[in-house]
Image (spheres, helix red, strand yellow):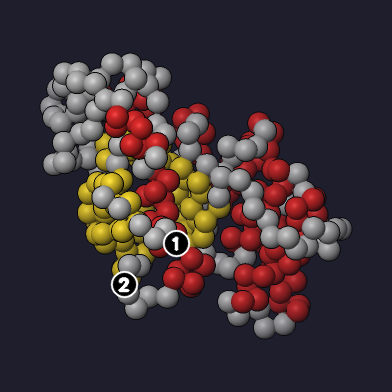
Amino acid sequence: MAVRDEENDMTTAETVIADADLVGAKVRSKAGSRPLDNDFKTIGEVRVNDPRMSCTDVNVFYGDKHAIKHVDLDIAQNQVIAMIGPSGCGKSTFLRCLNRMNDTIDICNVTGEIRLDEVDIYDRKLDVVPLRAQVGMVFQKPNPFPKSIYENIAYGPRIHGLAASRAELDEVVERSLAKAGLWEEVKDRLDQPGTGLSGGQQQRLCIARTIAVDPEVILMDEPCSALDPIATAKVEELIDELRENYTIAIVTHSMQQAARVSQRTAYFHLGHLVEVGDTTQIFTNPRHKLTEDYITGRFG
């Protein structure tokens, strides 16, 4: 795993911190840093007023590998939070905790508490099917169903009973495609395969498919990594529009993208949430040396 490879490459540099009042930041040479102490505390405000989701002491284990370590984090309503950090830092693993996608991995064990609107999503009595409708996921590579454009959008509302008639289903399809900025491009070929669209269109189709089941939260795992700059710009514009109605958490390797689309940024390093704060503050005045080193390109 990437995390294990990065840990095996650790050196033993002295403690260096950006803010003299902060402690616990152990860094190495330009390549990165060795693991932080287990009692390390995140820098910045992890809690917000009236959060959509609230995470407390979240840990993730792959077998005996401790991949996410004691993470506390609130995700605010109608806001975009960007999760950044070097490969293997745990940001995608943490994102998948938010709708229990890690349940599909046999050796994965998640502890701690994650609440959606005050409901513990890891309650054993909770049905994950409606949860994953409430907390939708858009993946790194577009993955449209091998169905028509229409059926890609209609499938979710149909199985969740969100449309009582064909007319209602038609309305959901049009509204979802319109919100994803795709309706005008595909309205005359809804019966054609979704896989026949361009890469950028396919990703917006997947976003429309997520919107169609009326989620509260949308998770995006590097949604633009496989797209060209023009398609990326369209998706970023869409993210900014969607936050008026949805809470969005996005994992990205592009710090420029994080700066453009998010209002809050969380920096992960080897399973720890190192620093979280207002995006402008994180990128212009990071308080932790690891955050500063990553943002300025010294490692990662």
188 in relation to 233, above or below: below
Q: Position of residue 129 (x, y in %)?
A: 49, 72
Residue 102 sits in which quadrant? bottom left
Residue 209 in view of the camera: yes
193 in relation to 163, above or below: above
Residue 156 sits in which quadrant? bottom right
Q: Is residue 86 left or right of residue 13?
A: right
Mark 1 or mark 2, earlier in chain? 1
Q: Residue furthest bottom?
A: 164
Q: Residue at x 42, y 58 (%)?
A: 105
Image quarter (top left, top right, bottom left or bottom right) of the C terminus: top left
Q: Name the mark nearer the viewer: 1 or 2.
A: 1
Real-space CA distance between mark 1 and mark 2, rounded to the nearest whole angstrom: 16 Å
- Secondary structure under badge 2? loop
Identify the amino acid type marked 2: Asp
On residue 123, the disc is 2
Q: Residue at x 83, y 59 (%)?
A: 192
On residue 130, the disc is none
Q: Position of residue 151 (x, y in %)?
A: 73, 67
Residue bearing mark 1:
104
Image quarter (top left, top right, bottom left or bottom right) of the N terminus: top left
Most foreground residue, 272 or 20? 272
215 in relation to 38, above or below: below
Question: Does the CB distance between marks 1 and 2 fall below 8 Å?
Answer: no
Q: Is residue 30 left or right of residue 199?
A: left
